[in-house]
Image (cartoon, grey):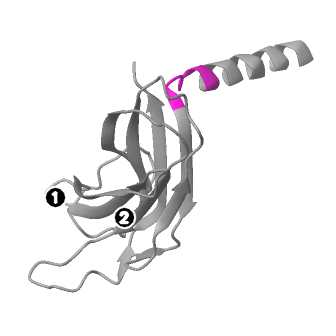
């Protein structure tokens, strides 16, 4: 019985670890129950092979408290020389009927949002992510963005 259970555990570990061969970096940070507009989520990226190219993703975990159809993010990539590239991005988060998009069986959905492709890293970089959601017809941003619980950043090897 012990050998059978050990064999099943070993097979499960191999299956789960081999499913994500492209992953180089994948980290999440909690923003609590609401993502404040002044809260910047920071990721210190590891030093990567400068001869290879990578695809970059912003990952989000959201629940049914997220009340908007889309999401606006300001993502800054700080290069080793101090120069920072800033992008304002828009992602669809829900169907027109309000059903939250993403993967997951519970009320928490995980979204893998494309950020950049074919990137070459030359040293250590930093990524800063900030929400920039605004309601229609209003200039100030949403102070506390309910429904986004975690923000992540992922790097995959380009194949």
Q: Quadrant of residue 140?
A: bottom left
Q: Residue furthest right?
A: 2
Q: Residue at x 33, y 67 (%)?
A: 66
Residue 55 % position (x, y): 38, 34
Classify 118 as above or below 123: above
Classify 9 as above or below 56: above
Give the quadrant of the C terminus. Answer: top left
Give the quadrant of the N terminus. Answer: top right
Q: Residue at x 31, y 42 (%)?
A: 114
Residue 134 % position (x, y): 21, 76
Mark 2 surroundings: few (<14), some (14-19) or many (≥20) residues within 10 A? some
Q: Nearer the viewer, residue 150 or 153?
A: 153
Dot placed on the residue nearer the N-terminal end, 1 or 2: 2
Classify 7 as above or below 120: above
**Element at label 1:** loop
Residue 87 % position (x, y): 27, 57
Residue 69 % position (x, y): 20, 62
Q: CA distance from mark 1 to mark 2?
A: 13 Å
Residue range (magenta): 17-23
Q: Nearer the viewer, residue 149 or 56?
A: 56
Q: Residue at x 83, y 14 (%)?
A: 4
Side of 88 relative to 22 (left or right): left
Q: Which residue is mark 1?
A: 97
Side of 22 relative to 102 (left or right): right
Q: Which residue is mark 2?
A: 64
Residue 110 visible somewhere in the drawing: no
Q: Reply yes or no: does residue 69 show up in magenta.
A: no
Q: Quadrant of residue 84?
A: bottom left
**Element at label 2:** loop
Q: Are marks 1 and 2 in contact (CB under 8 Å)?
A: no
Mark 1 surroundings: few (<14), some (14-19) or many (≥20) residues within 10 A? few
């Amino acid at each position: 019985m012990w050998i059978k259970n050990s064999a099943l555990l070993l097979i499960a570990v191999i299956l789960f670890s081999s499913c994500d061969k492209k992953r180089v970096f994948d980290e999440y940070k909690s923003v609590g129950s609401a993502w404040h507009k002044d809260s910047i989520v920071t990721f210190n990226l590891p030093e990567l092979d400068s001869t290879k190219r990578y695809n970059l993703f912003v990952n989000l975990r959201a629940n049914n408290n997220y009340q908007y159809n889309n999401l606006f993010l300001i993502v800054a990539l700080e290069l080793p020389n101090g120069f920072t590239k800033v992008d304002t991005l828009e992602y669809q988060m829900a169907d027109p009927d309000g059903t939250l998009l993403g993967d997951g069986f519970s009320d928490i959905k995980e979204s893998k949002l494309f950020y950049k492709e074919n990137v070459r890293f030359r040293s250590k970089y930093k990524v800063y992510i900030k929400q920039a959601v605004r309601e229609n017809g209003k200039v100030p941003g949403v102070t506390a963005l309910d429904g986004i619980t975690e923000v992540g950043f992922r790097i995959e090897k380009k194949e």
